[in-house]
Every structure is written in structure tokens, then in C-alpha cells.
Image (tube, rainbow, N blue to C red):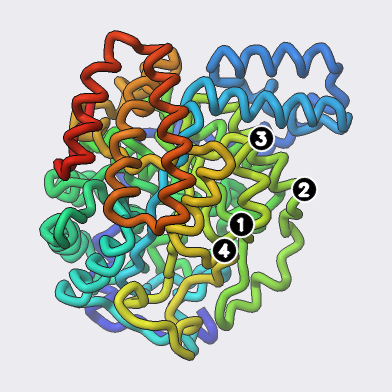
Amino acid sequence: MSGQSAYSMKEKDWISRIVKENEITRYMTGGKDFIDDEKIWDKITVNKNPEAGKIRDIIRKSLAIETLDPDETAALLNVEDKELWEEMFEAAGEVKRRVYDNRIVTFAPLYFGNLCVNNCLYCAFRKDNKTEVRKRLSLEQIREEVKGMISIGHKRLMLDCGEHPGTDADYIADVLRTIYDTKIGRGEIRRININVASMSIEKLNMLNQVGIGTYQVFQETYHHKTYRDVHPDLEAPKSNYGWRLYSLHRGMDAGIDDAGIGVLFGLYDWRFEVMGLLYHALNLEEQFGIGPHTISIPRLQPAEDTPFIHSTRYRVSDEDFKKLVTIIRLSVPYTGMILTARESAQLRREVISLGITQADAGTRIGIGTYSESYDEQEAKRQQFLLGDPRGLDEFIRELAERGYITSFCTAGYRCGRTGKRIMDLLRCGQEGRFCKLNAVLTFREWLDDFASEETKKAGEKVILKELEEIKQQIPSTYPKLMEYYGKIKDGERDLYF
């Protein structure tokens, strides 16, 4: 396209081998994908002015941990009554407590390369952004990054990079091995999720063999025309809507049964995007019997030399952001919900109570900045600007002061509680019991190994409350828990149920 830099021969050859049409069409019905733009808008229109009784019936269904249907979600999108919204906010928090209790899982993203062959208008990594300082970390540099993350207590991370032959699946596999092999004293990364480009079943199977947790792919926008408009370079692999849409289907067929979906709110009307997320969850359930393990809710944020961000007509206000979080929690009640440090500290405080289960903290999104100090190049090698730069210790202390326990648990993945098994446990409220036990053990670890004295005091109060609840609610397990708890206080690590 006019104004775009040409691909090198190596890039062209690599790009030509990415998209496999038979790994798109195999999941379609009648040659069509599961997002019908006109039907979605019809649902939203038909369900205008919902009666209060109908909304309360829908809330009761969500509280029973049942996935809502499209008409029910569309009805929630049309609520205007402030009192009903207050009931929905309260119900969203209750749904989260019934499924996940008061736990918040923390992680940090690790960006290891901003090379990219795509030209997404909303992203600072896009190929035609000439101000971006391009970098790909070597395996030794990644090891140093991970040491920096481990040193403040992170146990899980999210790998992120652009789409480029320099950061292909083979390199990602080497990165995974390097991270798992990196340890400092008692510290280590126990779970690696990946948020990378759409890949073939073959490539995903290879990564699964190395060992990944959740495979995240955000559709960015489910609206077909908007997707085309914001991915204008037709040679680029990400311009293929279907290849992107069925990324997680291919992941399932590759044996990765924890899928993470999401959109970038601000590219198109947020109500349409919420419906798209629901249809995505329903289609995964229909085809594989497994819904999304997580739904992420990033909003469009400023980025270096990315003018599109300032011209969008669909910017999501803070008020609407709270609404969309609430509706997603009610619509897909079993799923985890991820709130990132894109948002301000104050907004994160407000939104966490509406059903969030995971949040990053101590986050750095520049390439190579966990092992370096920030400098003037920072903004020119990151994808967007952070809204909440607080460190992990401060973030955890605030959560503890509000009655939340931070969980560093990764036991479920090593005990086979993934995919359909974890979905079933979440729906009946049983997974929360395993996680409550392991949250206490891993929080005890973190407090002893990494917490400041102030944070340790706040955390101790939460642990005492949790132990008393476990003693009352799960008395048969309490003696074993206290045995493990004592061993951890004596220096043993990584004990779990």
C-alpha cells in the first residue's frame, strides 16, 4: 500500500507460510464465521427498554453461574435505570466471590521483542512506525529480565512480542525454556502464559510441549469492517480476520485447553464488542466444551507516534468501562477477568470489586526494562503508556488492606485442573476451595521472601482471617493445611493441594 515500507525477501517468504486457510475453514459453519455483525446489532436493538423484572431474572441466572445467552446480555447492555445498575454492580461482585472468593492473582508481562511485520494502526509496534526503537532480547538478556522479575516475587508472567521471523515460534520456545531454567534462591517463574501472534496447530503443539499456560489472543475488534480498517496492510498476516478469530480453536486442537480472549476497547462500539466476546465464549463451549479461561479488557491508550488513537470515535469512558466489566462478569460468570496496568490506580481500585480475578503489578512494558533503569528511550520501545506504575509490594499491600488475598498459585496447572475440568469445578464453586488453600500457602511464601514490613503486617491480617474461614468451612482439610503452612514458615517452598 502507498506509504508503506517494503518487506524484505526473508519477511515475504516467512509471511507466505503463516496463514493456513484449512485451519480457518474447518471451524466455520456453512463457510461463515460465528460473528454476524447484523445479528449482533439486531439483538441489541430488539432488547431495548428491558423490564426490571427481566433484568433481575437474568441476574439470578448469572448468580447460579450459568452463561447468559445473547438476548440476555443484550438486555443488560440496554439497562439505563441507575438502581438496576447498582444491583448489577453488586451481583457482579457476588458472582466473583462465589466462583473465586476474595483472591486476586498477580502477574507481570514480559515484552521481549517489538519487531513486527503488521501495520495495526493502533499499535506503536506497527511496521511503519519509524520512531520506534526496535529490539529483540537475546536469551541471556531474557534471563536477566526474569531475574529482575523474580527478585520482587513474581511467580507467573505473560510473554508478549510483535509478529516477526525474529521472534517466531522456535525462538519463543527457546525463551520459554530459558525462563523456566532461571532461578534465584527461592524465587522462580512457575507459569508462563503467552500473548503472541496467531499460529498454526503445528506451531502451537510444539509450544505446548515446551510448556505454556494460557494462550491469549485478543481479536482487537469483532466488527468485520473496523477490523479491516485498522489492519490496512493486506499482505500482513494479522489482516486476515478469520486467521485471528480461530486462533484459540487451533490452540485447543493443539492441546492447549486454557484459552484467553479479549478485545481492545475503543476501536469500535463497546456494546458490540461485549456481544462479540460472548459469542466467542459460546462458540468455544459449543465446539470444545470449554469456554475461555480468561477474558481481558484492555482499553486503547496513548502510544508513541500512533495518531489513530487520538481520532477514534469509540473511546470508552470510565463509567462505560465499569459497565462493560460488570456485564462481562455476569454474562460469562465462570471466567477469569484480567485488568491491566493500562488503567489508572484509582480506576483499578473501583473496577476490581466488579469481578476482576487477575491484575498485573510492578509492570514494565519496555523491551529490556526489568533489568535496566528507565531512560528517555523507554516510550520509544513500548507498545503503549502505563496508567498504574505502582510496584508489586505497594499493590499487594493495598489489596490486603481491602481484604483481598494475593494468590501466586500455579498448582491447578500442574495437577491437571485445566480446560474442561477447571470449567466444571468453577461452575460448581469447588475450584475456589483448592485455590483458597493454595492462595494461603503461596501468599505466606511471598510475604516471608519478598514483602516489606508494612506489607507483611497487612498480609498477616488477611492470612489469619483466611485460616479461620478454612477451619470453619473445610475442617477436614485444615490439619493438612497447617502442616504445609508450618513447613513453609520453616523454609520449604512450592507445597500445594
Q: Which amino acid does label 1 sit on?
A: Arg
What residue appears at the point 35 percent right and 33 percent down from the top-left corner? 440
* Of the image marks 3 and 1, the number of the one nearer the N terminus: 1
Residue underneath mark 2: 319
x then y, percent, for residue 354: 63, 36
x then y, percent, for residue 381: 43, 80
* Of the image marks 4 and 1, the number of the one nearer the N terminus: 1
Look at the numbered discs 4 and 1 and tell me whether their residues touch, using CB distance below 8 Å. Answer: no
Helix, strand or loop status at disc 2: helix
Residue underneath mark 4: 388
Residue underneath mark 3: 326
Query: Spatial distance from mark 4 to mark 2, Cα to Cα?
Result: 18 Å
Query: Spatial distance from mark 2 to mark 3, Cα to Cα?
Result: 11 Å
Assess disc 3: are there few (<14), some (14-19) or many (≥20) residues with their C-alpha within 10 Å of its C-alpha: many
Residue underneath mark 1: 299
Total residue callouts:
4
